[in-house]
Amino acid sequence: MTSSSSLPQDAQDAQDARSAAEPVSGSRNESLRADALMEEDVAWSHEIDGARDGDQLDRSERAALRRVAGLSTELEDVTEVEYRQLRLERVVLVGVWTSGTVHDAEISLAELAALAETAGAQVLDAVYQRRDKPDPATYIGSGKALELRDIVLETGADTVVCDGELSPGQLIHLEDVVKVKVVDRTALILDIFAQHAKSREGKAQVSLAQMQYMLPRLRGWGQSLSRQMGGGGSSGGGGMATRGPGETKIETDRRRIREKMAKMRREIAEMKTGRDLKRQERKRHKVPSVAIAGYTNAGKSSLLNRLTGAGVLVENALFATLDPTVRKAETPSGRAYTLADTVGFVRHLPHHLVEAFRSTMEEVGESDLILHVVDGSHPVPEEQLAAVREVIRDVGALDVPEIVVINKADAADPLVLQRLLRNEKYAIAVSARTGAGMDELLALIDEELPRPSVEIEVLVPYIQGALVSRVHAEGEVLSEEHTADGTLLKARVHEELAAELGTFVLATS
């Protein structure tokens, strides 16, 4: 009897041990989901009832959720998002189509699928709905949210990714209906940035953007998480009936996040000072600067490597480059300039990221020339151009001269190339992969870079070789001849260097 009765108990103990060792899932996962943004856990709640939506388009067939064919990816990696510990494993995409054509809606979801894949997800299905505007309660409306729940159950998805930025209320209500995690486009992009940030400044900028996004979305169980009690006993104040909760757990978390945000802003400002000093030093030496800007995955890093041999990471993934890279380059005529690779842009780039990365994006605003790289193989490259120019406007760089570099020309539709070359005033088609068009691009950069304003002809004694070197480094040498008395130079230089060369001038024009 003893032996037979102990077997079930042993089996039960083993089962309990296995359960403790396995990842949290199902209903336990719902109760233990935590935020790892800070040392303390930030509790999340699903206790809010889903609001019903009366303004539905259910009667119209065109309002139905429509599947998008061909948006399925198979990935083995699973990446845990550091600030919310989301496991983006098996996802269903959902979008609201408010304007444009069906093709536009499908392109937008295809881009969302690429973002999800970059984050380490497997896309199981993708649907979109035609609405005049997103539903204020559940993004797609309560009726369609129930249909989405059926799709989630059918596919076995554990996450829904929405193609837009959802309000805190929309996230709560939609999660309450579909019963799985809901992530919006902004959170997905923040996740990717968190994975790809390598430098100290990049990590700080991403952390700041994450905290700005999370602050209004913290959820808790209200008074049950109070940390302290107000009121008093015999010492005065209110009695038992008047004592209320003090600072709640969620209020504490918000306060500490604000404190951490203030600290992060100070750190970023200090890092910005160092970069500003380097930029001022380049300007003092009159070294022209060129910034490479463009849509994510358009080939900016490949172009930088092709032009300078910089050896920057090149990866077929969105936002592979977050940390700006500055390299020295030289025009065909021998003029030195700097070439800066910048973070990629995307449609509806989260405002938090634009603000957090503003100091990095200033490389674009402070440059003398922008190489605006666009993916020529994209179905609608004009949309990429418009999205990037919107961010360029936000950082105050609209007055900087721009060359549109149509990359991946070897894989582009010839008709698309012709259309872009015809519509853009300064445009050139290249292929960073094959090197096609690079000589023409270098010549165009040489032509568009600002030139020194003073043209001089000087005879510099050989003992003043340092001045000759400066003319080569900071100016534009038109002709050079070595004579018995010294180096005869005809060059264009800036005003400060022209003043230093004044005693050797033969003629000035």
Image: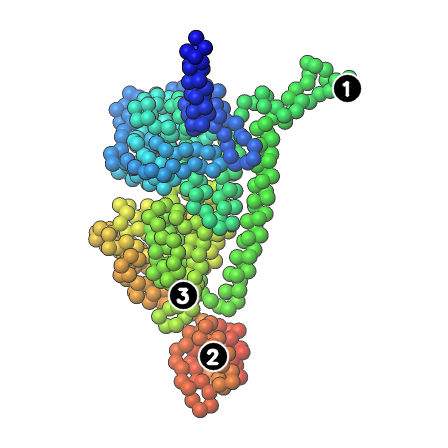
Q: Residues within 10 Å of mark 2 (few under 14, many from 20)?
A: many
Residue 281 lies left or right of residue 118; in this view the side is right
* The label number, if any, that marks residue 236 in the structure image: 1
Sequence-first disc among 3 and 1? 1
Q: Is residue 484 above or below residue 326?
A: below
Q: CA distance from mark 2 to mark 1?
A: 85 Å
In the drawing, does residue 102 fall left or right of residue 14? left
Label 3, label 2: how far apart the Cα atoms are = 20 Å
Q: CA distance from mark 3 to mark 1?
A: 75 Å
Neighbour class for label 3 at 10 Å: few (<14), some, many (≥20)? some
Above or below — where is 230 with respect to 454?
A: above
Count residues near mark 1 (Cα–Cα under 10 Å), then give few for <14, some for 14-19, many for 20+: few
Residue 424 image-quadrant placement: bottom left
Mark identifier at residue 419 = none
Identified at 24% across, 51% down, the residue is 412
Residue 92 lies, in percent from the top left, at 33, 31
Kindly identify the amino acid type of the residue bearing the numbered disc 2: Val
Which residue is at a point 42% across and 74% down the rendered structure image?
476
Assign a secondary structure to mark 3. Answer: strand
Question: Residue 406, how many percent across, how many down?
Answer: 30, 55
Q: Which residue does the numbered mark 3 point to in the structure image?
A: 329
Q: Amino acid at mark 3?
A: Ala
The image quadrant of residue 311 is bottom left
> Which numbered circle lies on residue 468?
2
